[in-house]
Image: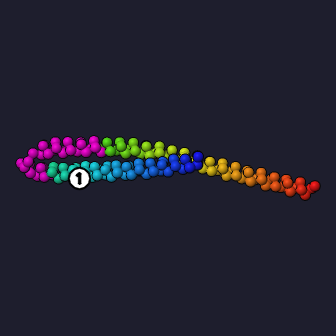
Amino acid sequence: MKNSLQTLSRVQKWNIDEQRKILANFLTEEDKVEQEISRINQEYEIEKKFSEENPLLGDFGAYTKKYIRYRTRLEKRLQAIRDKIAELRDFITELFKEQKTYDIVDERRTQRQEEELAHKEQQMLDEIGTNNYIKANK
């Protein structure tokens, strides 16, 4: 029984590690999308300033529409990533709760076994003491 609990605990720890790796990948992806949004916002401001200084060059309205579409796609992607991150964090929390349960069960089982062993040793010592007392008082 002890081995099966240890196996469950090892599998659970492995699952937690795997989910943490996936979470790290999503966090990296979130960072990249945030950086891309920041980059295009800066680029837009530069283009806006250039357009104000040179109103006869190019169609800033078309650029703005393209910028808004691209930014909207990035923001949707960022939200999807954040939703997945929240979902993964909840899942990892549940895995940790299960792991803690396994650890508590194992700890209690070990404690109970130690108490049983101590009780058996005490009974054996009591029996030896009783036998020695009986022999000495015969």
Residue interval drawn in magenta: 49-78
Residue indicated by mark 1: 39
Image quarter where the C terminus lies is bottom right
- SS for dot 1: helix
Q: Residue at x 88, y 55 (%)?
A: 133
Q: Residue at x 41, y 48 (%)?
A: 19
Q: Residue at x 54, y 50 (%)?
A: 6
Q: Is residue 91 magenta?
A: no
Write down the quadrant of residue 71 in the picture: top left
Give residue 94's position: percent from left, percent from top.
47, 43
Give residue 80's position: percent from left, percent from top.
31, 42
Looking at the image, which is closer to me, 48 or 132? 132
Rendered view: 27 above or below 76 = below
Q: In screen coordinates, is 12 left or right of 29?
A: right
Is residue 82 something that shows in the picture? Answer: yes
- Check disc 1 and give the amino acid type: Arg
Give residue 63's position: percent from left, percent from top.
14, 45
